[in-house]
Amino acid sequence: ELAYRFLVAMDRDHAWDTNPIYWLMHESIYAEGSSQPTSWAAHRMQQEIPALDWKKALANGDDIVFSGEMVFPWMGKTFLELKPMDGVAERLAAKSDWGPLYDTEKLRNCKVPVLAAAYYEDMYVEWRYSEQVA
């Protein structure tokens, strides 16, 4: 079982009540030009891959794989500040007519100087993808 102090620290450092737009819009990044709904992608994967479910991992004595920046449908029913947006989030997760999120040609021709930090050991983006975009 995870220590209470650890859980409290994690809760404090990941405050959904002060950043609700992140929870609401995050799912859409997986829909780039898709005609398929995201249907709560991280939640589906968590159900398909036991290592991604921390409760199952602990019960089995397995390593815990952190979900990082993922969002889940239960958050809209659990977190007070997200409850008013739960219906909208459900509609966004069911949306199947997403257009392109980025216009790569416009980005390529952008004259505004841009800097970015990329990390070899980034838990979210593989290095080769960062290199391709740069």
Image: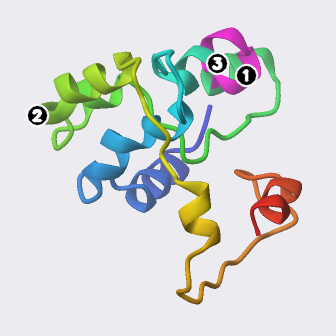
- Figure quadrant of residue 108: bottom right
Tag 1 residue: 57
Asked whether residue 16 is in view, the answer is no
Could you say whether the residue bearing mark 2 is in a helix, strand or loop?
A: helix
Placement of 104 over or under 95, stated as above or below: below
Residue name at image x 53 percent, y 21 percent:
43
Q: Position of residue 128 (x, y in %)?
A: 88, 56
Q: Report how far apart the C-alphas of labels 2 and 3 lie in the structure.
A: 26 Å
Disc 3 residue type (three-letter): Met
Quadrant position of the N terminus in the picture? top right
Q: Residue furthest left?
A: 84
Residue name at image x 81 percent, y 22 percent:
61
- The dominant secondary structure in magenta is helix
Disc 1 residue type (three-letter): Ala
Circles 3, 1 touching at the beta carbon (< 8 Å): no
Magenta residues? 46-53
Placement of 41 over or under 111, stated as above or below: above
Q: Is residue 118 magenta?
A: no
Check residue 45 in the rendering and tell me which mark sits there, or answer none. Answer: 3
Tag 2 residue: 84
Q: Position of residue 68 (x, y in %)?
A: 60, 46
